[in-house]
């Protein structure tokens, strides 16, 4: 007989930052995605239903996800977190590599003068600087999203990270919601993600299920890593 595993994340100690861009200021450069059945919104609803306080959740959607707004939010929204708190950060939209080699996620105003996009390397840098907690779970559903994993590996210091992305740093990613749907299923505790039938889903089980789903359904490689004690 198996017994349920105690959940090791607590909604009251969780901070959520979700950036979902499916439409952009420059549609000639960044093609829009369908708005129906947005799974980034489903992630927001999941955390709210679990009891994460509204004051600890920030969701920037489409035109609200400008680079200035994203950077300001990272610098100010999480400063009230406590030392044992967890950050969940997620992006969906377009991802790409610049000629200089850096990975960018397409903020709403990417393509404006002097705005190449949201540089993935600035994400762990901002978390290390502004988030007082201990752990951060980062996820990205877009092309070249594995560049975020590389940025975390290069910069991880005080924070323990888990980073799970829909593609490698140099590959395109499906326009479907396969990755995010798998992430949602694991967070919700769907039984098929529980590989050892322990009535609990570990981070490794979640990652392995998504890796298998993406390889089978989309023929693409995901990126996954942890640092420190995560």
Image (cartoon, grey):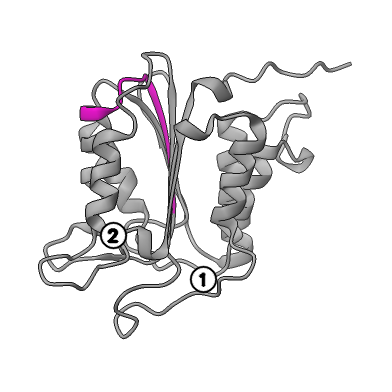
Image location (x, y in percent) of residue 23: 42, 72
Task: Please name the residue that numbered disc 1 is placed on.
Answer: 175
Image location (x, y in percent) of residue 164: 45, 44
Image location (x, y in percent) of residue 197: 79, 29
**Residue 183 visible in the displayed image:** no
Q: Is residue 23 above or below residue 40?
A: below
Residue 20: image tag: none
Q: Residues within 10 Å of mark 1 (few under 14, many from 20)?
A: some
Q: Is residue 32 above or below residue 51?
A: below
Q: Give the residue at x 42% y 14%.
A: 84
> Would residue 74 be found to the left or right of residue 44 on screen?
left
Image location (x, y in percent) of residue 88: 45, 36
The quadrant in which the C terminus is found is top left
Rendered image quadrant of residue 160:
top left
Rendered image quadrant of residue 191:
top right
Q: Secondary structure at mark 2?
A: loop
Rendered image quadrant of residue 51:
top right
**Residue 216 visible in the displayed image:** yes
């Amino acid at each position: 007989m198996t017994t349920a595993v105690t959940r090791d994340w607590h909604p009251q100690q969780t901070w959520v930052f979700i950036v979902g861009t499916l439409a952009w200021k420059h549609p000639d450069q960044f093609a829009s995605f369908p708005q129906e059945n947005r799974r980034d919104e489903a992630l927001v609803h999941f955390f709210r239903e679990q009891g994460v306080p509204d004051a600890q959740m920030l969701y920037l959607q489409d035109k609200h996800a400008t680079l200035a707004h994203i950077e300001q939010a990272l610098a100010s929204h999480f400063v009230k977190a406590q030392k044992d708190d967890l950050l969940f950060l997620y992006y969906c939209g377009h991802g790409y590599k610049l000629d200089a080699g850096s990975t960018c996620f397409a903020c709403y105003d990417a393509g404006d003068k002097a705005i190449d996009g949201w540089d993935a390397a600035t994400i762990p840098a901002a978390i290390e600087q502004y988030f007082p907690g201990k752990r951060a779970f980062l996820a990205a559903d877009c092309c070249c999203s594995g560049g975020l994993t590389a940025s975390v590996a290069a910069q991880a210091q005080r924070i323990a990270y888990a980073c799970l992305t829909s593609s490698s740093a140099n590959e395109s990613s499906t326009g479907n919601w396969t990755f995010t749907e798998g992430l949602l299923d694991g967070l919700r505790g769907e039984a098929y993600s529980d590989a050892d039938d322990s009535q609990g889903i570990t981070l490794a089980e979640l990652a392995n299920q998504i890796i298998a789903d993406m390889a089978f359904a989309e023929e693409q490689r995901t990126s996954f890593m942890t640092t420190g004690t995560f």
